[in-house]
Image (spheres, helix red, strand yellow):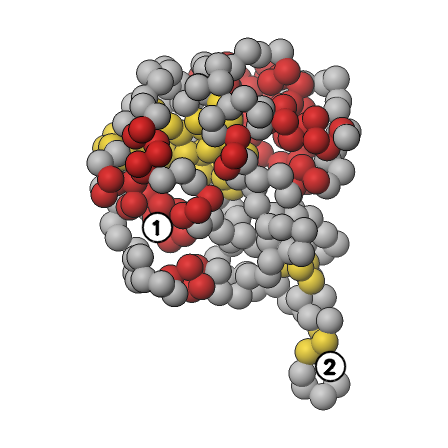
Amino acid sequence: MANRILFETWAPPASLWSRWAKPVLFAETLHGMLSNRSLSEKELDAAKTAWALPNNNDTAIVLDVPGETAVLYAVALANKGYQPVALFNTTSGSRAAIDVSKIKKALTLGAANLRGMTIPAKAPPAFILDSERKPQGRSPKPGQYDNRWVVLPQDFPSGRFLMNHGIRNIVILRVGTKPAADDLSHILVRWQERGLRIRGASLNSNAAAGDIRVTRPNLFRLAFSRLLVMFGLRRNSAGGFGAVVPEESSGGGYYG
């Protein structure tokens, strides 16, 4: 029950955007569960001052920064009238490839902040990602829990849906100015081709968001591009991503 309350705090049933929120991480026992402690002013200070964006109701945000930081920014944006949409589509396990414990703690504490806010049901969305969802050059070893994950076009509203509900601009918050990861590019180009204005802002700068042109990723819109984006990743039976990498057997095969 506590898990469901926590999830619905982040994904209120009345919100237009909650249908895209991912419940898989909330199904686990989060840090302290329904803690009365909230994120402190000190923890939220950087998110409130380093990158300020007024809410014009026609702008959606994509927070593609390290997960714990993304949660902090999402709470700060909720104070400005945005609806956070948690897209963490991963699970946790022993010897995990990605440590999601700080994300889980931030989600629990941030829920206490959100419970003190009144966010309109039609508030524009702030989609929350973890830029470290698929670390490069680090393949999990046998016996390790592989919880790397990616986003797919169906994880976001279509460009048509966004525009039908008043969204005309997308602002992506990233670390530095590096291009969007390949999985996210497939979504951004679809939005771009639908006519949405794509802008980028940096976690390292106070500069206003500037227009960017997202380059089509390889194999864009091809039927098997989804399989290539997900290649080598492991789905979890409860939903999302995450499973133990099988150990090698003495016969040279795998078991598990």
Task: Bin the neighbour count of mark 1 within 10 Å (Cα to Cα): few under 14, some 14-19, many 20 and up.
Answer: many
Looking at the image, residue 24 sits to the left or right of residue 182; the answer is: right
Front residue of 60/194: it is: 194
Residue linked to disc 2? 249
Q: Nearer the viewer, mark 1 or mark 2?
A: 1
**Residue 171: x percent and y percent?**
34, 30
Task: Give the residue type at disc 2.
Answer: Ser
Residue linked to disc 1? 186
Quick check: 250 above or below 69?
below
Residue pictured at 47% horizontal, 29% vertical: 17
Residue pictured at 29% horizontal, 45% vertical: 190
Front residue of 89/239: it is: 239
Task: Give the residue type at disc 1.
Answer: His
* Element type at mark 2: loop
Residue pictured at 73% horizontal, 71% vertical: 256
**Residue 1: x percent and y percent?**
77, 30
**Residue 214: x percent and y percent?**
26, 45
Looking at the image, residue 183 sits to the left or right of residue 41; the answer is: left
Give the total number of marks visible in the rendering: 2
**Residue 251: x percent and y percent?**
72, 88
Residue pictured at 62% horizontal, 50% vertical: 239
Lower sequence index among marks 1 and 2: 1
